[in-house]
Image (cartoon, helix red, strand yellow):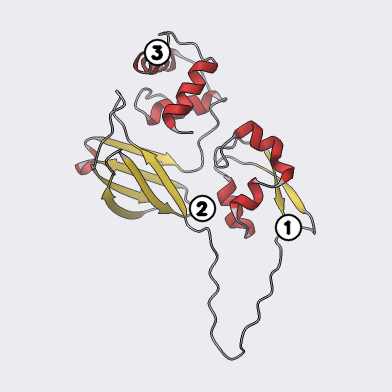
Amino acid sequence: MGTGGIYHTIQQGETTSSLAQKYGLFWETIWDHPENEQLRNLRKNHNVLFPGDKIFIPAVRIREESVITDKKHRFQRKGIPEKLNMQFLDLYGDPFANAPYTLIVDGKVSNGALDDQGWLRAPISPNAQQARIEIGESGELWALDLDVGHLDPVTELTGIQARLRNMGHYNGPVDGKDGEGLSRAIRSFRSIHGLEINSDINEAFRNKLSEVYKT
């Protein structure tokens, strides 16, 4: 890595958290570095990056610890695992309060219940790739498959498609291509959230989509 650090070009599916895991750093150490100020201003969320973004990875600082020899010592790295935070609402914005859920992350199954505001909060590995979330018994309220870390910024058409699809407005591919299916989804979202009903993708729409999706 060198004494100062390196610049890394983001690939699809990479996040600041997954890079922190890879390089042995806290994600805050990477994201808050002065060299990443421009990226912070552009992307806002440390785990919503876009392929081709450049991020600076500072060198690891070595810390020495004095220990007694011939003894076992355990050193725990802080900041792992990551947290999956998702709120589940119906199309009209009402939460699926206290609904049971099943979370499957890279084949590992866990069960629990949403809180009274519809939030699911669960620890996951920073390197998690695939997740499936089923809300209600056998997913009758909601079922969602996620490519973890693949959400593009809301400035990109793929980011808009993914958010609308995850909220149930859009059922087409996340391919960055416009079409009637996406236009209908935009109009549906606008009508429910108090925006002028059209298929325009403007600043007001992006801001409302980010606000509702929480990123």
Q: Is residue 29 left or right of residue 213?
A: right
Q: Earlier in the sequence, mark 2 or mark 3?
A: 2
What residue did someone put label 2 on? 127
10 Å crowding of disc 1: few (<14), some (14-19), many (20+): some
Distance between the alpha carbons at the discs numbered 1 and 2:
20 Å
What residue did someone put label 1 on? 59
Asked whether the residues under the numbered discs 1 and 3 touch, taking CB atoms below 8 Å apart as contact, a structural biologist would say no
- Residue 52 in view in this figure: no
Residue occupying the point 52% across, 20% down: 177
Q: In the image, what residue type sits under mark 1?
A: Ala
Q: Is residue 73 left or right of residue 104?
A: right
The local secondary structure at tag 3 comes to helix
10 Å crowding of disc 2: few (<14), some (14-19), many (20+): many
Asked whether 47 or 9 is in front, the reply is 47
Distance between the alpha carbons at the discs numbered 1 and 3:
47 Å
Q: Residue furthest left?
A: 137
Q: Dividing the picture into quarters, in which one does residue 86 lie? A: top left
Q: Dividing the picture into quarters, in which one does residue 147 lie? A: top left
Q: In the image, what residue type sits under mark 2?
A: Asn
Q: Earlier in the sequence, mark 1 or mark 2?
A: 1
Asked whether the residues under the numbered discs 1 and 2 touch, taking CB atoms below 8 Å apart as contact, a structural biologist would say no
Q: Is residue 59 left or right of residue 17?
A: right
| Spot occupied by residue 98 in the image (x, y as percentages of width and height) | 23, 42
Residue occupying the point 38% across, 23% down: 170
Q: Earlier in the sequence, mark 1 or mark 3?
A: 1
- Please state which of the two labelled residues, at mark 2 or mark 3, is closer to the viewer: 3
Residue occupying the point 51% across, 52% down: 127
* Position of 116 relative to 75 (above/below): above
The local secondary structure at tag 2 comes to loop
